[in-house]
């Protein structure tokens, strides 16, 4: 293994349950990372400098705000506000106002937690492919999943070369689970719409058809987990 992350989360989450295993892994990594911003390490100079520069996105601010350590968050935000204060100046003219407007909008485009979360997740996408290559029994676990959300299917494709000599077989198995998920969803949505014909009102809907609109959201936008 070239990437120094444990494979424990991969073992735990490729477990045949219905949702996207990578959404679950991401939620766990996200939780750990977010919590680290409320611990003692947050006041270290390099962490503080990064928070000053990048700030937090809406999602991560909400997670931090929901935690018990309000003081930890306030200390972070206090320094971040210094950066924001530097950007807010009285513009001399319309040209300068436009430039300042762009700079102010950019302040909200970065997030220190997202930066590290993305880096960690790329290592997971690569490691899934490496586990496929190195652990023979993992093939069956991959085939037992119910596919992925579109984003995670896309990134697994993107890093499939990490499966080395087994890349072709890996791609075939990813495709198999993903196409099955989408074809089943299409059937469920069609059953749902067909059922709304007045002649079908006495036919019971399958569970898949009942859940199909939520499942569509999970496919397109990922599973939303609260840990
Ligand atoms: Zn996902
Ligand atoms: Zn974020």
Image (spheres, rainbow, N blue to C red):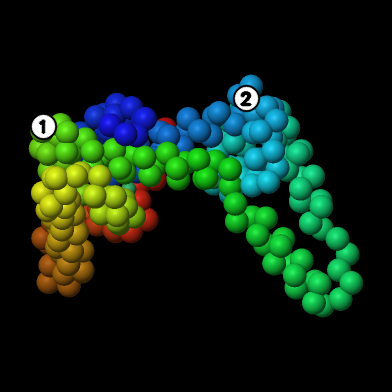
Tags 2 and 1 in contact by the CB under 8 Å rule?
Answer: no
Q: On the image, which quarter does residue 92 sit in?
A: bottom right
Q: 226 or 53, which is in the foreground?
A: 53
**Element on which disc 1 rests:** loop
Numbered badge on residue 137:
1
Q: 176 or 205, which is in the foreground?
A: 176
Estimate the x, y position of residue 212 in percent, counting from the top left.
Answer: 24, 57
Residue 214: tell me if it is visible.
no
Q: On the image, which quarter does residue 154 sit in?
A: bottom left
**Element on which disc 2 rests:** helix
Estimate the x, y position of residue 61 in percent, counting from the top left.
Answer: 60, 42
Estimate the x, y position of residue 153 in percent, counting from the top left.
Answer: 27, 53
Locate the C terminus and report the quarter of the image it occupies.
top left
Query: What residue do we see at 46% from left, 37% from top?
Result: 30
Q: In this view, does 114 lie to the left or right of 106?
A: left
In the displayed structure, 43 sits above or below 221; it is above
Q: 158 or 191, which is in the foreground?
A: 158
**Mark 2: C-beta under 8 Å from nearest atom of ligand 2:** no
Closer to the N terminus: mark 2 or mark 1?
2
Residue holding disc 2: 41
């Amino acid at each position: 293994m070239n990437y120094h992350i444990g494979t424990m989360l991969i073992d735990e989450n490729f477990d045949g349950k219905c949702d996207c295993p990578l959404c679950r892994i991401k939620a766990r990594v996200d939780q750990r990372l977010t919590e680290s911003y409320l611990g003692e390490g947050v006041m270290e100079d390099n962490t503080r400098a990064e928070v000053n520069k990048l700030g937090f996105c809406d999602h991560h601010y909400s997670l931090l705000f929901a935690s018990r350590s309000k003081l930890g968050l306030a200390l972070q935000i206090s320094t971040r506000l210094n950066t924001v204060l530097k950007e807010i100046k009285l513009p001399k003219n319309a040209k300068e106002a436009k430039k300042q407007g762009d700079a102010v909008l950019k302040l909200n485009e970065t997030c220190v937690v997202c930066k590290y979360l993305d880096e960690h997740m790329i290592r997971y996408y690569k490691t899934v492919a490496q586990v496929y290559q190195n652990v023979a029994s993992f093939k069956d676990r991959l085939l037992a999943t119910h596919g992925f959300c579109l984003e995670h299917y896309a990134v697994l494709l993107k890093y499939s070369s990490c499966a080395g000599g087994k890349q072709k077989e890996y791609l075939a198995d990813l495709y198999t689970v993903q196409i099955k998920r989408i074809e089943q969803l299409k059937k469920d949505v069609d059953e749902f719409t067909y059922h709304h014909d007045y002649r079908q009102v006495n036919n019971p809907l399958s569970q898949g058809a009942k859940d199909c609109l939520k499942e569509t959201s999970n496919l397109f936008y990922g599973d939303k987990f609260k840990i």
